[in-house]
Image (cartoon, rainbow, N blue to C red):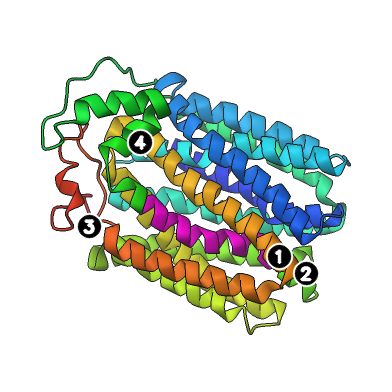
Amino acid sequence: MRWLRSLYLAVGAAMGSFFPFLVVILAGRGFDPAQIGIATAAGSVAYTSAVPAWGHVGDVTLGRARALQVGAIGAAAAVCLFALPLPMVVAVVLVVVFNAFQSSMQPLADALALAHVPDRGRDYGRVRLLASLAFAVTSIACGVLYERVGFWATAPVFAAAAAWMCVSVVGLHDRPIPDPGRPRDPGPARGEATERPRARRLLGTAGEAMGLQPRLPVVLFAIGLIQVGVLASFTYLPLRITDLGGGPELVALAAGVSALAEVPGILLAGVVSARIGLRGLFAAGSVVYAACIASWLVIDAPLAIVATRAVTGVAFGGILVASALTIGSLLPPRLQATGQALYQTVAFGLAAIVANLGGGLIYGSVGPWLLFVLTALSALGAAAVGAAVFPVRGAGTAPADGSALGVALSPEHEVPLGM
C-alpha cells in the first residue's frame, strides 16, 4: 500500500504543477478564448485517441506499471519543451503531445490500485484522495512560486513529479495478462463467443469490454455529461477569475480549494454510497455540481467564486469514487486497465473536447453566462441518466469469465461491490 500511496501523491503533484495554469499560460502567450478552446480541445482529441491504447498496452503488452512509466516520461518531456518561449503552433503541438502521454497516468494508477488494494470499497478512496491532496498542495504552492519566478518553473516541478511516479511503480510491477483463446462464457449471452473476438479485432480490449457489458456505454454517457460541466469549469473559470481582477495566486487557490475539498468528498463517499448506493452518490454529486455552476451566473467576486469551489470539490470527490468503482464492478479483472481507460477517455477526453472547444467559442462570442447555463443543464442530465443506470450497490469486480454480467443489467441483481 505504501507504493500506491506514493504513486497517487506523485500523480496529484504532477497534475497540480501544470494543469491549473495551462489556460493562464496560453492567455499570457497571446491566445484568445477561442484559440485557447482550440488548443485545449486538440489536446483532448489526443487524450481521447491515446487513452484506450494505454489501457490495451497496460492489460496486454507492457503491463500497467511499465506503461505508466513510459507515459510519465513522455509527459515530462513535453512540459519541459512547452516551458520554452515557442511559437503558438509549436505550443499547441506540445499540448497535444503532453495529453497523449499524460492520458496514461490516472487510468493506469487506478487499475493498479484496484488490483492491489485489499478492499476496494474501503481502500480505493483512501489512496485516491492522496492525489487530490497532493494536487491541492502543489497547485497552491506553485501559484505562489510562479507568481514570483514565472511559468518556466513548470518544467522542473513536473519533471520531478514524473520521476517520483516512475520510482513509485517499482513496487507495483505487474506483468501483461496473457490472452490465449479463452473458452466461451457460460450464461445467457450465447452469441458472445463469436461477438467478442470480432470486437477484439476491431477495437482491442476496449471493444471486448463494450461487448461484454452492454450497460457500460450508457454509464460512460452519464459520466461524460457531468464531466462536460466539470471540465468547462476547470478550463474557463480561471479566465472568469482573471476577468474579474484575480491573478495566478487566486487561480491556484481556486484549484487548490477544490482539490482539498475532494478529500472529505472521497472519504464520505463510502459512507454515503452505503446508504444511497453508487447511483445515488453519483446523482447527488451531479446535482450539487450543477447548483454551483448556476451560482456563477450571479457571483462576480473572485473570492466568492473560490469559496464555491470548496462545494464543487466535495461533489466531485463523490462523482470520482462512484464512477471508478462502477467501472470496476462492471468488468472482470483482466479488463480493469481497459475499463479505467475507457472511463478516462470519456471523462477527460471526449467530454473535454466538447467543453473546451464549445466552451471557448461560447465564452469568446457570447460570454460566460451562456456557458454556465449549458454546463449546469449538462450536469443535471448526468444526474438523471446516472440515477437510471449506475449500480445500486458497491464495488468488487465482475467474475473473470464475465458470466455474471448478464444479470448485472438488472438493478435488482447488481454485481456486489463488497461494501
Earlier-in-chain disc, 1 versus 4: 1
Camera-side residue: 296 or 42? Answer: 42
Residue of label 2: 242
The disc, 4 or 2, on the residue closer to the chain's N-terminal end is 2
Q: How many residues crowd mark 4 within 10 Å: few (<14), some (14–19), many (20+)?
A: many
Which amino acid type corresponds to the residue marked 2 in the rendered image?
Thr
Q: Taking 197 as reference, is 356 left or right?
A: right
| Rendered-image quadrant of the C terminus | bottom left
For label 4, the SS is helix
Image quadrant where residue 207 sits: top left
Between the residue at mark 4 and the residue at mark 2, the CA separation in whole angstroms equals 40 Å
Task: Classify 10 Å Cα crowding around label 3: few (below 14), some (14-19), many (20 and above).
Answer: many
- What residue lies at 17% left-to-right and 24% top-to-bottom? 184
- Is residue 275 found left or right of 200 in the rendered image? left
Residue 238, label in figure: 1
- Amino acid type, mark 3: Arg
Where residue 58 appears, x then y in whole percent? 44, 27
User: Does residue 417 appear in this view?
Assistant: yes
Q: Which label belongs to residue 336?
A: 4
Q: CA distance from mark 1 to mark 4?
A: 34 Å
Q: Which mark is residue 393?
A: 3
Say few, some or many: other residues with alpha carbon within 10 Å of mark 1 (under 14 / 14 to 19 / 20 or more): many
74 horizontally vs 249: left or right? left
Question: What secondary structure is the stretch in magenta mostly built from?
Answer: helix
Q: Is residue 227 magenta?
A: yes
